[in-house]
Image (tube, rainbow, N blue to C red):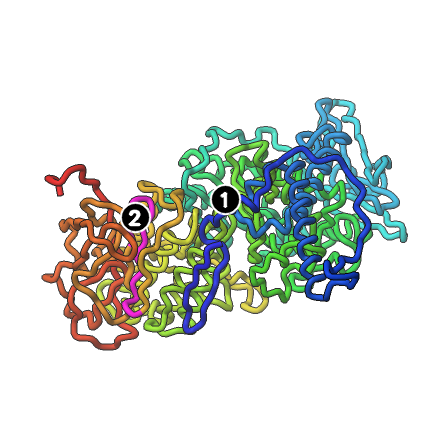
Amino acid sequence: MENVKTSCHGFTFQPLIFQRPPAPPSLLPPIRAPAPAQAPAPAQALLDPLGPRLLGPRLRKMAASTAQTNSSEAALAAVLVDMPELARLLEIDPYLKPFAVDFHNRYKHFCMTLNNITEHEGGIDKFSKGYESFGVHRCPDGGLYCKEWAPGAEGVFLTGDFNGWNPFSYPYKKLDFGKWELYIPPKQNQSIVVPHGSKLKVVITSKSGEILYRISPWAKYVTREVGNVNYDWIHWDPEHPYKCKHSRPKKPRSLRIYESHVGISSHEGKIASYKHFTCNVLPRIKNLGYNCIQLMAIMEHAYYASFGYQITSFFAASSRYGTPEELKELVDTAHSMGIIVLLDVVHSHASKNSEDGLNMFDGTDSCYFHSGPRGNHNLWDSRLFIYSSWEVLRFLLSNIRWWLEEYAFDGFRFDGVTSMLYHHHGIGQNFSGDYHEYFGLHVDEDALIYLMLANHLAHTLYPDSITIAEDVSGMPALCSPVSLGGCGFDYRLAMAIPDKWIQLLKEFKDEDWNMGNIVHTLTNRRYLEKYIAYAESHDQALVGDKSLAFWMMDAEMYSNMSVLAPFTPVIDRGIQLHKMIRLITHGLGGEGYLNFMGNEFGHPEWLDFPRKGNNESYHYARRQFHLADDDLLRYKFLNNFDRDMNKLEERYGWLSAPQAYVSEQHESNKIISFERANLLFIFNFHPSKSYSDYRVGTALLGKFKIVLDSDAAEYGGHQRVDHNTNFFSEPFEHNGRPYSLLIATNRARKSPKIAIHAAASAPLAETVKPGNNCMCITVEIYLLRSEYLTNAKKR
């Protein structure tokens, strides 16, 4: 690994792998057939050649170290014989070689589980279709077939509207392995026994004699009547189910994600619907240039304020927004716009609800979850799955397939992966990057194998499907293919980036921002593992925290966002830095980009769902999109910039390009410059200095034109840059680049209302008379595109 060091406010950091590390040939033994097994020689004391004395302690330690090294190399060679593709992962990161056996064991466990599924269930394709037999299903003859897994139950019955709620008139038959089944023949007139829309319950008699009314874990639709506490299971079997009209879009080259919540997508103080989102929000997302939607809080959750992370019914689309058919229409309409749709899937834990959840389904605490303390998440107050259970695997893998096939989702963002990966669930852990933190007995291998199986299933069924891991620990190979020993995710969230921006805004003055630390945070990612970069997500918008816009502008957003009023220093700084933070995150932070709905235009206030603590108010559980549509408000400037930033990325594809080359991170000048996808990005973070004729290095020889300028009028800028200016690079080495160019602004355009003339990208004209140095900032961001010149005449 190359020792790259960056400075952060007086501290020196040695980051993890930034670039592809060299792989010395001596560390990669060739893969050969294993030698015949031999019995190990008995251990003998090493002798001093000068006499029959035993070697000293230091020499004995050296000899033992040499023996251990030889043993490790032999073990590595044996692993690579059995798993040759692992050599590629170890070539990418040689520091993983001491853990080759761990990768090998994980892969063997995965293969063994997959082989067992094939041997006993006919393959993962059949195994993952549990929803076709479990639950309640109408038969072709009009009868009803029911099946449940309740290993701790003494008896299982079906009741509901169809039998006048007689709890014991339809008993299930007990099968092997804790399964129960029931067949109800059709009525004499061949009519359906349980019509669409009927209420049902599974009745469980426990071994202790209790009679429990439960909702089937496989229920496809549950709803709650006004005034009721618990949800009701509704038999969903419409006569004319929604049929998709549009094919799935192809996997996008670059991923630009709009993180969305259907319920808060209206400006009104109520829960919005699937229909509202389809008709009003999808066109907005398309116009903003996003090509992917991540839908939150879709899996049914009884508690609205949980943001969808306390799941009660895993196969049911939340009824508070509408019907399953309306969700299918939403996804299908998005596909017609060329937008893929990801589901925020929660398989890391489940709600503790028992009457309308999975908890205590069969009367025991060990049906779908670990029994005892291991089955509880202390911080989340929820239940933890037992991933080694055969039927839990069937349930979760079938759940993955259900959302892919029934609703045509294009992939998943897996929530709470860190909690799944470790027995300690990440609680109280400060992951330092030491590789020993990712291997050993503290790793939940059963959960890891489940994640490998889930990724294998999704990518086998739909090769273009996308999976994203929410992991804060930095688990190596999480986004490497399963065949290489990885977990198989396509992307992981770059969760350190939003924390860094919040830290800078909360704890540091603008003049104290450390350029090297910003670049380090944005580029510190594992080689060949893709990251989703974001300046802020739903986490930063929740009550108790603030969005970036609110951190920077706070109360003035209520009074000074009108274009009819002059810029105040606070609003000016906030608007310009908002654009700057987003673009540098977009351009430098990863291989994908995410934005939470409304934050693109600096949505004011915070997000808070109705609860007792706020008198069940919906005032903060909404998105006020009309603010960005109002020509008299400055929110439109941020909205326009976000739109054009995304559309520029669509044109040049920097997210799918190799990682950027950072040529400058100047601490005193507060300049960051980097190149990616044949674009030159230049940022000036200085709160009080501007620069004229500033030299910037580049790898390209040619003419450069401005393709995005945050100082343009349509983005709330001060129009100090002449877009008709061409910039020419010359063969003058600068900052390690073979060519360089001078950047200058149009000096004729000065803004007398701006006290401080600072930039966020290219150097600007001379400094205007300063004042309020830390507050009054104008920000300019230039993206420069090179037009290659083929001969000296054109130059």
Dominant secondary structure, magenta: strand
Q: Residues within 10 Å of mark 1 (few under 14, many from 20)?
A: many
Q: Is residue 272 visible?
A: no
205 sits left or right of 160 in the view = right
Relative to 307, residue 573 above or below:
below
Q: Position of residue 267 (x, y in %)?
A: 42, 55
Q: Which of disc 1 and disc 2 is earlier in sequence?
A: 1
Q: Residues within 10 Å of mark 2 (few under 14, many from 20)?
A: some
Element under disc 2: helix
Residue closest to the far front: 50
Pointers 2 and 1 in contact (C-beta within 8 Å):
no
Name the amino acid type tagged 1. Answer: Tyr
Q: Is residue 126 above or below residue 469?
A: above
Q: How many discs appear? A: 2
* Residue at the (60%, 56%) spot, across then down: 435
Q: Position of residue 99 (x, y in %)?
A: 64, 50
Which residue bears the numbered disc 2? 644
* Residue situated in front as seen by the camera: 417 or 315: 417
Q: Which residue is mark 1?
A: 274
Quick one: quadrant of the C terminus?
A: top left
Mark number, residue 210: none
Measured as percent of width and height from the top left, residue 661 is found at 35, 51
- The residues tagged by marks 2 and 1 sit, at their Cα atoms, a distance apart of 27 Å
Q: Is residue 677 magenta?
A: yes
Identify the amino acid type marked 2. Answer: Asp
Instruction: Write the start and end of the magenta stretch as one range.
Output: 668-681
Q: Is residue 605 left or right of 199 when viewed as pictured? A: left
| 133 lies left or right of 689 | right
